[in-house]
Image (cartoon, grey):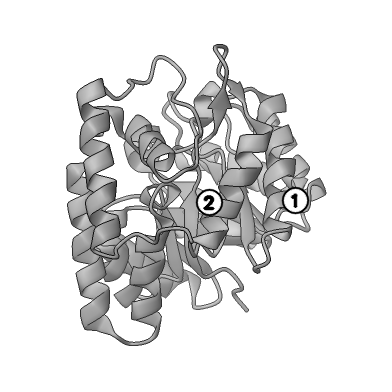
Amino acid sequence: MNRFRGVYAAMLSPFEGRASALSLGGLESYCHFLAGKGADGLFPFGTTGEWPHLGETERMRGAEVVVKAARSSGRDVKVIIHAGAHTTEQACRLCSHAQSAGADGAAVIAPPYYPLDEDALFEHFTAVAKEAPELPVFIYAIPGMTRSDITPALLLRIRRAADNVAGIKYSGSSIPRLREYRKVMGDSFALFIGDDSLALPALHEGADGIVSGNASAVPDLLATLYRHFTKGDYGAAAAAQSELDAFIGSMDESAELSCFKNILAQRGVPVGDVRPPLKRLSPAGKVVVAELVRRMEERGVLLRDG
């Protein structure tokens, strides 16, 4: 029985001080904000969380804080820790730590940079999954970043070799591929879309939920879309998707993560800014973001506190 459903916020990583240290206190407050705005799950230290710029110890300590914060949120908020890494050895350590930290699951990206064939990918994913046999493990497919294609046949092969592989986060752009994953893997396999522009189409195709980078800053918008869909109010869900598409279009793509962090600051959740060499939002861009948040709150798209 699949117990992973809903909107999972692909979290940003809060930094503080001139050295941009990972803020553990900021991380806890941020988790409570996301849970309070309707996120069903937390997905820390993935692409939105700047994982390539984080050390292993930071990621482990941060994972412990996220799990603890989710448990104290007052809601049943699941935590899937991204444990992907450039090497199998490090991914194994991170996945094992996610299990010992009490996470509900771990996700593993295909190692980027070097091209890997299906056999290499199979060996990597099965080795990592077997390192934490009691933990549901998600394959994180993001071909635009890794150059690796997780085919349905490969996914099924991995699942047969490691039965704790419980789902996939698919951040590609092909609805037919999503449909094929569902057909091959069956209804008990958790299927999440990672491309927010396809959120509603993916739900119509049988996706269990959305792991959303935009939900890092506007979780309430994604939660609204998902709730309308599950209630069968497809017109309202389509309107929410239109709001989401407009929001995506308003972002400065070259400084997207900094945009998200500035939005959070506008919403009363300071998380610092991105680590170099990622681009920071310009002063003019910050003014645009502030106006965007104000207008979305006025229209009731975003929920104000209080």
> In this figure, which residue is indicated by the disc labeled 2?
139
Instruction: State the SS at label 1.
Output: helix
Residue drawn where x is 23% and y is 63% of the image: 299
Vertical placement of residue 145 versus 56, above or below: below
Q: Can residue 50 be seen in this view?
A: yes
For disc 1, the neighbor class at 10 Å (few under 14, some 14 to 19, many from 20) is some
Mark in front: 1 vs 2: 1
Q: Tell me if residue 138 comes above or below residue 120 in the rendering.
A: below
Residue at position x 67%, y 46% in the image? 66
Residue 106, position as x, y percentages in the image: 64, 50
Label number found at residue 68: 1
Image quadrant holding the N terminus, namely bottom right
Residue 145, how many percent across, how many down?
Answer: 37, 34
131 to the left or right of 194: right
Tell me, yes or no, if residue 157 can be seen here.
Answer: no
* Element type at mark 2: strand
Identify which residue is drawn at 29% across, 85% down: 233
Vertical relation: 59 (above or below) 143:
above
Q: How crowded is mark 2: few (under 14 residues within 10 Å), some or many (20 or more)?
A: many
**Where, by quadrant of the figure, is residue 113 drawn?**
top left
Task: Please state which amino acid type lies under the numbered disc 1.
Answer: Lys
In front of the other: 3 or 237: 237
Mark found first going from the N terminus, 1 or 2: 1
Establish if 51 lies above or below 72.
above
